[in-house]
Structures are given as C-alpha cells and as structure tokens.
Image (cartoon, rainbow, N blue to C red):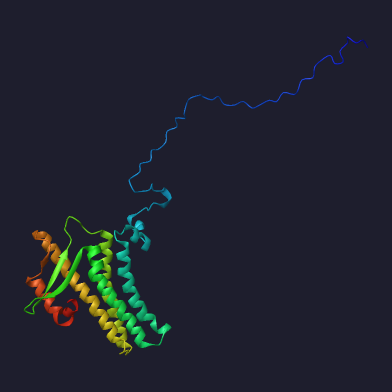
Amino acid sequence: MSASTPLLEDTIEPDEVVEPPRPPLSAGRIPTTPRTPVVLNPGARPAESNNMASTPGDAEAGIAGILRQSAHPVALFFLYIFRISAIAVYLLCGFFTSNYVLSTVVVVVLLAMDFWNTRNVAGRTLVGLRYWNQVDEDGESYWVFESREPSHPANPVDSRMFWIALYSFPFLWLALLIVSILKLSASFIPIVALALVFNITNAVGFTYADRDAKQRWANQLGSGWSMGGLGGQLLTSAVKNSVGRVFR
C-alpha cells in the first residue's frame, strides 16, 4: 500500500436528525381571538356562573344569604340572638341546673336586654323607628315617636326580618304560657307573663310608630313630633297603667 493512498476513501457523516416541522411564526403579531369582555363594578366581584342563583328565592335562602343582603347584619343578628336565647334558656334550663332562681334571673336578664335592644338599637337601625313614653309636669303621659326621613327608606331585608321577629315571638311566648297553664307549672307563669309584657309592648309601640310615621310622611310634617289624637289616646290608655312607667 503506497503512502499516497488514503486509508478511507469516503468520509463518514453523522446520521441526520429529522426534526418535525414547526408551524410558521408570525413575528410581531398577537393572536386576535375574540374574547368576551368582563365588566367590573366598583366594590363588586365578577359572578361565577356555577354560584349564581336561578331564582330570587334561592339568593335569599338561608341565614348567610339574609345577613349578606342586610344593611346592618350585626343589629339583625343581635335582634334574633337575644330573643332566641331567652326562649332557649327557658326551655332547656331544667336539663342543666335545678336552681330555679338562677334560671329565672338569666331569663329575665335576657328579656330585659332584648327589650332595650329592640326599642333603642334594632328599631332605630333596621327600620328607622323609635318611641318612648314621656310624662310632663302635670303628670300626663304621652308617647313620642321618631322616624327616618322618607328619602332614606329602610333595607327591605332588614325591615321584613324586623317585623317578623316583632310579631312572631309574642305568639311563641303565648304558646308557652298556655303550656304552663295546662301543665299547672305556676312557678313559670310569671316569667312567661313578663316576656309577654315586654314583647307585646314593643310590638304595639312600633306598630303605632310605623303607622304614625306613614301618616307624618303623607302630611309632610316636621322631623320630631309627639303623637296626639285618637292613635295616641288608644295606645296610652292600653298600656299607660301597666307598662308606661317602664319607659321613663
């Protein structure tokens, strides 16, 4: 073999790697696929289709839904918690303690807190109504009512739940009074009677306050006024001798 003869006549080339074809890129272009615009309201989150209620009744169902729609959920919560707690302690106190005095004191305290909260906080906050009984220098007592301006209406959920609580719980206590009488539980009758006095007083007072507020709005009178006439006479004669002194 001569020195001028090459050892390898052909050069070995590496195997070629065949790459899959890539889609052509359009430089400097942005995909123009149409998308549905999202409109955001201030303070609101976009609603998801899976969580949307199909009917208004579904949106308002449940305690959480009521509290979400309420303008004053804290006041609405305490309005019901005081009333429910008083009835719950009255019904269940015998299962936890045999001390009659302790049970009575707890129920009376809850009733007093509910009475004060309903008349001074819940009524003013939820429906814009407040009332009290005032005695002048001559010894004459009369009822004074306050209400919000008609240009600031109450929240519909707050108003509905307030009136439900105001009218339903007196019937519950009345049913408990009938049960106590049928069972001859004379020791519990004074507690139920006190609960009825507190609940009925608030129901009557706010009923007349609402009625006279509507009359006041219709007549376009001033902001603060004391009720006279037939409505005031009926209300005063009904509760003046029994519970009128409570509001002094």
Q: Residue at x 36, y 77 (%)?
A: 88
Q: Is residue 62 visible?
A: no
| 143 vs 13: above or below | below
Residue 197 in percent (x, y) is at: 23, 79
Residue 47 in percent (x, y) is at: 39, 48
Q: Residue at x 14, y 82 (%)?
A: 241
Residue 109 in percent (x, y) is at: 31, 79
Q: As drawn, is 107 to the left or to the right of 137?
A: right
Q: As drawn, is 208 to the left or to the right of 77?
A: left
The foreground one among 164 and 1 is: 1
Residue 94 in percent (x, y) is at: 40, 84
Give the number of marks. Answer: 0
Quadrant holding the C terminus: bottom left
Q: Residue at x 22, y 65 (%)?
A: 124
| 213 vs 184: above or below | above
The foreground one among 96 and 51 is: 96
Q: Quadrant of residue 152?
A: bottom left
Taking the view exactly as shown, the residue that stands out farthest to the front is 137
Q: Is residue 147 visible?
A: yes
Q: Quadrant of residue 220?
A: bottom left
| 66 vs 35: above or below | below
The foreground one among 191 and 74 is: 74
Quadrant holding the N terminus: top right
Q: Quadrant of residue 210?
A: bottom left
| 66 vs 142: above or below | above
